Image: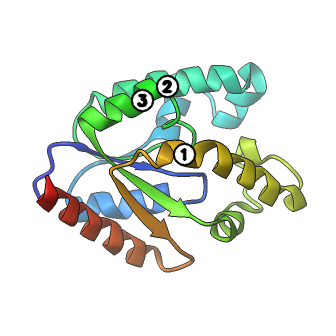
Amino acid sequence: MNLDKIILLVGLMGSGKTSVGKRLSQKLNLSFVDGDKEVEAAAGLPISEIFKCFGEEEFRNGEKRVMKRLLNGESCVLASGGGSFVPDEVRDLAKKNAITIWLKADIDVLQKRTTGRSHRPLLNVAEDEIREKLEKYINLEYPFYSDADIIVETHDEDVENTVKRVYDAIVEYKEKI
């Protein structure tokens, strides 16, 4: 497939952006870029430390700068951070330079995939509070994700099945434009 745009995967933490993105990049013969890793590299700190030292607002400012740089870069499969698609300027740039794909997962899938994972500072709560926190992010961020070009439901399934559905959705999208 001839792609001259970035493939931007958006969705909440636990939706499968990194797992799907790594495999999709191989299938498309594109490099894979993890937005969270790029934020960490730019800051010289793990995300959990950025939150601890500087707070969420400063993290979001840095994340926005990194996303703008990445969205002006070469074609790749880019797995964005969960909230990085929220700022208008990031979504506008993504519309121009990327095919955006929302990996939409329901609350049960998100909870299963995020419970017990200590590397997610926004879910640094007791296990019995994770569902409530995820529901908050669903309400806040799903309206922004709905701006994506393509929506693919992710399920509790083998990641290769999700990759195939994302790939097929890209093919169908490219045929329409």
Q: Name the residue under label 3.
A: 90
Q: Percent position (x, y) of residue 138?
A: 65, 51
Q: How far apart are marks 2 and 1 (CA)?
A: 18 Å
- Nearer the observer, 30 or 95: 95
Dot 2 amino acid type: Lys
Q: Percent position (x, y) of residue 46?
A: 63, 34
Does 36 appear above or below 54?
below
The first of marks 2 and 1 along the sequence is 2
Q: Percent position (x, y) of residue 62?
A: 54, 22
The first of marks 2 and 3 along the sequence is 2
Q: Residue at x 59, y 44 (%)?
A: 141
**Could you say which quadrant of the image residue 93 lies in?**
top left
Q: Mark 2 points at which residue?
A: 64
Kindly check if marks 2 and 3 are in contact, taking CB atoms under 8 A apart as contact.
yes
| Secondary structure category for the residue under label 3 | helix
Residue 152 horizontal side relative to residue 127, left or right:
left
- Residue 63: tell me if it is visible: yes
Q: Percent position (x, y) of residue 95?
A: 30, 37
- Residue 44: tell me if it is visible: no
**Could you say which quadrant of the image residue 92 lies in?**
top left
- Is the residue marked by circle 1 packed among few (<14), some (14-19), or many (20+) residues within 10 Å? few
Q: Mark 1 points at which residue?
A: 143
- Is the residue marked by circle 2 packed among few (<14), some (14-19), or many (20+) residues within 10 Å? many
Residue 150 horizontal side relative to residue 155, left or right:
left
The first of marks 3 and 1 along the sequence is 3
| Secondary structure category for the residue under label 1 | helix
Does 4 appear above or below 61?
below
- Is the residue marked by circle 3 packed among few (<14), some (14-19), or many (20+) residues within 10 Å? many
Q: Which residue is drawn at 75% across and 22% down?
A: 53
Q: Distance between the residues labelled 2 and 3?
A: 7 Å
Q: Which of marks 3 and 1 is in front?
A: 1
Q: Residue at x 62, y 28 (%)?
A: 45
